[in-house]
Structure formats: C-alpha cells, structure tokens
Image: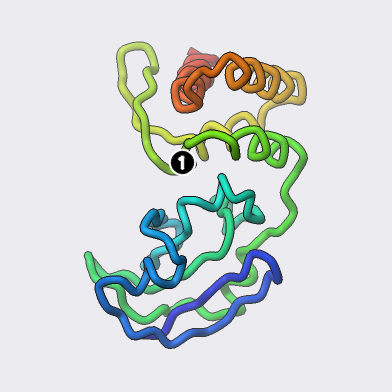
Amino acid sequence: MKALRLNATTNAIEELELSMEANTIYTFFSSILIDELPTLNRHIIYTDANALSEAKDAYFIGEQLILGDALILGKEGFSDIDVSITKEELGSLIKHEVNSFYKEALSLLKSTDINLYRTFIAKKQEEEIPLNTEWVLYTFNIADSKTQEYFLSELKKALESAQNAESFMQKMATLALNAGA
C-alpha cells in the first residue's frame, strides 16, 4: 500500500510501500497508542499518541497541530487505501513554524498524561460540545497576547497544584465557548 511518511526531525516527506497487516501501524510507531486524524480529505493521518510526552517536534498540516512523525494513508469508508495526495501537495500544506505560545503550552503539557486529540465535553450554556486539547490550544493561540498569558499562567498553576490537565482544558474550553455568549 502506498503511504507518505512525514519525518518531524528532518521535515522530509517520504513515499513508502507498506504491507498492511493487523499490527502495521503499531509496528511503524513502535507503540500501541496511536492517534488517527481525519484532517485531510479522503486520507487519515496516523501519529504516535506518546509524541507529546516524548517532546517530539511540532508542526501543522493545514491548521491541524501534529507532533512527531506522521504516516498518511488514503481512506475510503473504514478501509485504508493508497495515498492519493502527492508529496508536493502535502508539502504545501505543512508549516514547520510553531510560535512561542504553542511551544510553551506543549512544554508544560509534556509532563502530563493528556492526549491532544481525545475529546471531552464542554458546555456552552446548556449545549454539550465535544472538543479536545488541540482545539483549546488553537483557540487560545488566536486570542490576544494578554489572554494567552492568562492561559499559560493558569495552566502552570493547575499543573503545580496537581490538577488534572484534561479537567483544566475542559474548563478553558468552556470559558472560550462562553466568552462571546
């Protein structure tokens, strides 16, 4: 099966030919904890769920924050298929510049057991909305610098007091959702 691999250390995009078996993805990352991100149309991005705790390099595919190496396969229904996006098309979507807000937030979160993409429920008034830590970081990243400083300061306090990181993110998501309400 034709796949693309993004090497987070070298920024290289490589074409691979994989023989897909039950454990291929897990073997590729040497991990049983894998994140599946449907960011690209008709494709799936596989990443190592341990990349945050291992302080792997961060970058963006479009607006999607990715940590560490990524394996990209085509997706049709529930089946993995040959990748159809070219190396050049994928390369045009990748941004390796990660600003200081993201760097500091990721540095603080690396000592936690949080997963950037695992969903939790946040409430906007009475509506329950499934969100994740990656969304919270994105939302506070586009806020003004004072709000970003508030977020990072509160995150430091929460982690120093041994507050659960996911609970903190849920609280921040709720604050962000209700800021304009």
Assign the N terminus to one quadrant of the image. Answer: bottom left
Q: Position of residue 127 (x, y in %)?
A: 31, 19
**Vertical placement of 14 versus 110: above or below?**
below
Left or right placement of residue 17 versus residue 108 in this view: left
- Which residue is most to the left? 78
Q: Residue at x 59, y 50 (%)?
A: 54
* Number of numbered tags placed on the structure image: 1
Which secondary structure, mark 1? loop
Which image quadrant for residue 154? top right
Q: Residue at x 59, y 22 (%)?
A: 159
Left or right placement of residue 19 versus residue 134 in this view: left
**Vertical placement of 158 versus 81: above or below?**
above
Q: Position of residue 87 (x, y in %)?
A: 57, 79
Q: Position of residue 53 (x, y in %)?
A: 56, 45
Q: Which residue is mark 1?
A: 115
Of the pair 65 and 25, the residue shown nearer to us: 25
Which image quadrant for residue 25? bottom left
Name the amino acid type tagged 1: Asn
Q: Residue at x 76, y 19 (%)?
A: 146
